Amino acid sequence: DIQMTQSPASLSASLGETVSIECLASEGISNDLAWYQQKSGKSPQLLIYAASRLQDGVPSRFSGSGSGTRYSLKISGMQPEDEADYFCQQSYKYPFTFGSGTKLEIK
Amino acid sequence: QVQLKESGPGLVQPSQTLSLTCTVSGFSLTSYNVHWVRQPPGKGLEWMGRMRYNGDTSYNSALKSRLSISRDTSKNQVFLKMNSLQTDDTGTYYCTREFGVRRVFDYWGQGVMVTVSS
């Protein structure tokens, strides 16, 4: 199985601050990487797919980058509504696997 | 619009079988793949398995011996059955729709919380 190592586990940011979350795959996943946001008590919501493509309706302050085994999610200008858990997920090979998550809080 | 909704018992006794239903609307099960994903309380997400648009299934090898996914296209429903439940099977179970060549999950159900306890 492809292991997805996500860091950091938790992060605290001030409003307006830029934050980054990283995912490292145990093997190359050819940009088959998605990022999801999960607010407390809610279902995950797709933010980014194909490593860098913004899902319809997602604010442009969210962006994704990376290739091969290393990928990152950036939030340019933290907003109150961005407080949530974030997960990466590879869909390159079955079983699909997720990162362990990053808890993002407002400082 | 696209919707998925999970239903099933909130409480299951250890060693018993879990049966969940995902009822979908706004799309056809013969055109899209539907997956099951679960999440233990306060923890991360685990992919469980998939019902393909053509009826084929795929399972997480860690669960394969206990898990079965089926469907009824006439009722727009996908079913999950998992036997020999233990306390670490406690969590929220989601069904989700797969979209596109990148196989991302673009719509999720609200989830159903399942507690395994006597």
Image: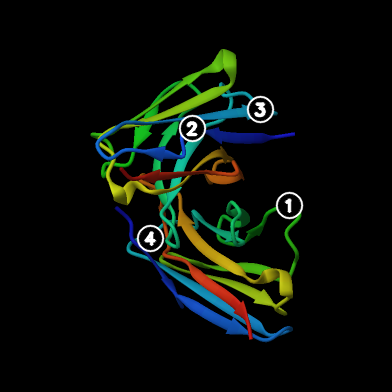
Whether the residues at callouts 4 and 3 have beta carbons within 8 Å, the answer is no
Please tell me how crowded label 3 is: few (under 14), some (14-19), or many (20+) other residues with Cα within 10 Å.
some
Q: Which mark is residue A56?
A: 1
Q: Which mark is residue A75?
A: none
Quadrant location, the N terminus of chain B: top right
Q: Is residue A64 left or right of residue A89?
A: right
Badges 4 and 2, same chain: no
Whether the residues at callouts 2 and 1 have beta carbons within 8 Å, the answer is no
Please tell me how crowded label 1 is: few (under 14), some (14-19), or many (20+) other residues with Cα within 10 Å.
few
List the residue tagged with mark 3: B27
Residue drawn at (59%, 57%), measured in percent from left and top? A41
Q: Quadrant of residue A106?
A: bottom right
Which chain letter matches label 1? A
Residue drawn at (45%, 26%), measured in percent from left and top? B79
- Dot 2: element: loop
Whether the residues at callouts 4 and 2 have beta carbons within 8 Å, the answer is no
In space, the residues marked 4 and 2 are separated at their CA atoms by 38 Å
Query: Which of the marked residues, 4 or 1, is nearer the chain's N terminus?
Result: 4
Q: Which mark is residue A28?
A: 4
Q: Position of residue B40 (x, y in %)?
A: 41, 54
Q: Amino acid at mark 3?
A: Phe
Which chain letter matches label 3? B
Residue drawn at (52%, 32%), measured in percent from left and top? B33
In space, the residues marked 4 and 3 are separated at their CA atoms by 33 Å
Q: Quadrant of residue B100?
A: top right
Q: Amino acid at mark 1?
A: Asp
In space, the residues marked 4 and 1 are separated at their CA atoms by 26 Å
Query: Which of the marked residues, 2 or 3, is nearer the chain's N terminus?
Result: 2
List the residue tagged with mark 2: B8
Which chain letter matches label 2? B
Badges 4 and 3, same chain: no
